[in-house]
Image: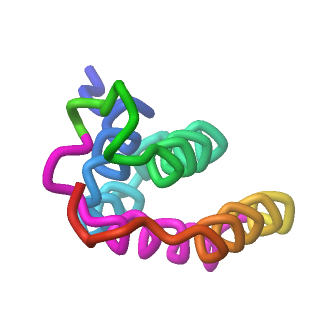
């Protein structure tokens, strides 16, 4: 039975583990993933500010730069449609940077 699901890749991405995500996707067969959900989740986390009332528990200790690196890697390895979505998120994040480097 396959123990890895799309949630495995999502978890690696949202925790900022680029190396783990790259390894999971390099397996044969690759660990399944849902890039749209990962991009949406990373965008949501990057837009969430520390002064908000709710901070997702998985965000603790994750640097915004780690999440941006994952988005950049995904952009270089995805379809044209996803590249456009990822570029949009990266531009949005660049125009409104988060203060500090660790959540």
Residue 16, quarter of the rendered image: bottom left
Give the main secondary structure, helix, strand or loop, of the magenta stretch. Answer: helix
Residue 28 x, y percent position in the rendering: 38, 56
- The picture quadrant where one finds residue 69 is bottom left
Coloring scheme of the render? rainbow
User: Which quadrant holds the C terminus?
Assistant: bottom left
Name the spot of residue 88 as percent of width and height, x first: 77, 65
Q: Quadrant of residue 101?
A: bottom left
Q: Residue at x 84, y 68 (%)?
A: 80
Is residue 94 highlighted in magenta? Answer: no
**Residue closer to the observer: 59 or 79:** 59
Residue range in magenta is 59-78
Residue 59 at what x, y percent from top left?
Answer: 26, 43
Name the residue rendered at 36%, 74% in the picture: 65
Q: Is residue 70 above or below residue 21?
A: below
Query: Is 68 a magenta residue?
Result: yes
Q: Is residue 92 above or below residue 65?
A: above
User: In the image, what residue occupies the spot 59% across and 37% down?
Assistant: 37
- The residue at the far left in this view is 61
Residue 38 to residue 96: above or below: above
70 left or right, relative to 60: right
Looking at the image, which residue sits at the far front?
51
Count of number-bearing discs: 0
Residue 7, relative to residue 72: is it above or below?
Answer: above
Residue sitting nearer the eye, 53 or 5: 53
Q: Is residue 4 left or right of residue 70?
A: left
Identify the residue shown where x is 40% and y is 40%.
10
Of the 4 image quadrants, the one containing the N terminus is: top left
């Amino acid at each position: 039975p396959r123990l890895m699901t799309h949630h495995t890749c999502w978890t690696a991405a949202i925790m900022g583990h680029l190396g783990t995500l790259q390894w999971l996707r390099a397996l044969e067969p690759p660990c399944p993933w849902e890039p749209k959900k990962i991009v949406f989740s990373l965008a949501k986390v990057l837009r969430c500010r520390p002064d908000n009332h709710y901070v997702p528990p998985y965000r603790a200790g994750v640097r915004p730069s780690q999440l941006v690196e994952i988005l950049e890697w995904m952009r270089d390895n995805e379809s044209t449609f996803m590249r456009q979505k990822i570029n949009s998120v990266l531009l949005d994040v660049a125009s409104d940077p988060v203060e500090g480097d660790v959540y």
